[in-house]
Image (cartoon, grey):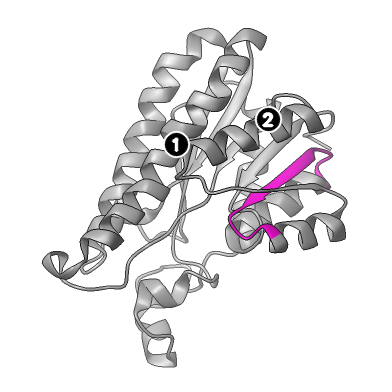
Amino acid sequence: MRLKDKTAIVTGGASGFGEGIVRRFLEEGAQVMIADINGDGAARLAEELNAFSCAVDVSDPASVAGMAQAADKTFGMPDIFVNNAGVTHLPQPMEEVTEADFDRVIAVNCKSVYLTARAFVPAMKERGSGAILNVASTAGVSPRPWLNWYNASKGWMITATRTMAVELASVGIRVNALNPVAGDTPLLKSFMGEDTPEMRAKFLSTIPLGRFSTPQDMGNAAAFLCSDEASMITGVCMEVDGGRCI
């Protein structure tokens, strides 16, 4: 119960890594709002887990403001905010990625962090406490070919995490990130281009522990970094990658 009496919002929480974080937070005693562009999926999971839900497009200022209003009405401004929602483009040479795909990756993976900070940091400052967790990627630490602009967006998120941590430390807000390696989630096929036994074997050969990361792995790491046990930890971008970045 390390998150007992805490409130949390997890974006992209209806599936994949986000769902793993939601489930772990609930097990640790938090009240959780599942925020996802898939509003129906968020509502179904919230009903199953006795949580709250909110439909949100994290790249849209009005939608993010609506999420903040919904949270305030539900349980007040959250103690914990997890920027987990993310997208990628299909693997291809950098000059062949369409401008629309580039704009979408930057809007969802980068602009969303700015928008959610604008929506939630002021109340955290006023309270004098808070934990923000950004879900970046090993792609931002050790980029793979063909995922060029996705790699860049996650490198941006890692730098954003550190600069947020430096600026907000003096007002009691901790900011950390997780860098997962590819996991068996809805995004896996997009990372690989095609989901075949051969492509999976090729990916796994780059991970020393020999398996993909799981939603449970992410939930465990997130629960620690967002708990009071990690009260001296800020600006850390923790690899959850089975040794991929060694």
Query: Which amino acid type is shown beneath numbered disc 1?
Result: Val
SS of the residue at dot 1? helix
Q: Which mark is residue 113?
A: 1
Q: How many marks?
A: 2
Query: Which amino acid type is shown beneath numbered disc 2?
Result: Gln
| Residue at x 36%, y 32% (from the top left corner) | 160
Q: Is residue 173 left or right of residue 69?
A: left
Res 169 visible: yes
Q: Is residue 186 left or right of residue 36?
A: left
x then y, percent, for residue 114: 42, 32
Quadrant in which the N terminus is drawn: top right
SS of the residue at dot 2? helix
Which residues make up the magenta segment?
27-39
Mark 2 vs mark 1: give the one in front: 2
Quadrant in which the C terminus is drawn: bottom left
Distance from disc 2 to disc 1, alpha carbons, whole Å, reads 17 Å
Q: Tell whether label 1 touches label 2 (CB within 8 Å).
A: no
x then y, percent, for residue 162: 38, 28
Q: Which mark is residue 210?
A: none
On whether residue 62 falls in the magenta region, the answer is no
| Corner quadrant of residue 45 | bottom right
Of the numbered discs 2 and 1, the one sitting upstream in the chain is 2
Circle 2 sits on which residue? 69
On whether residue 29 falls in the magenta region, the answer is yes
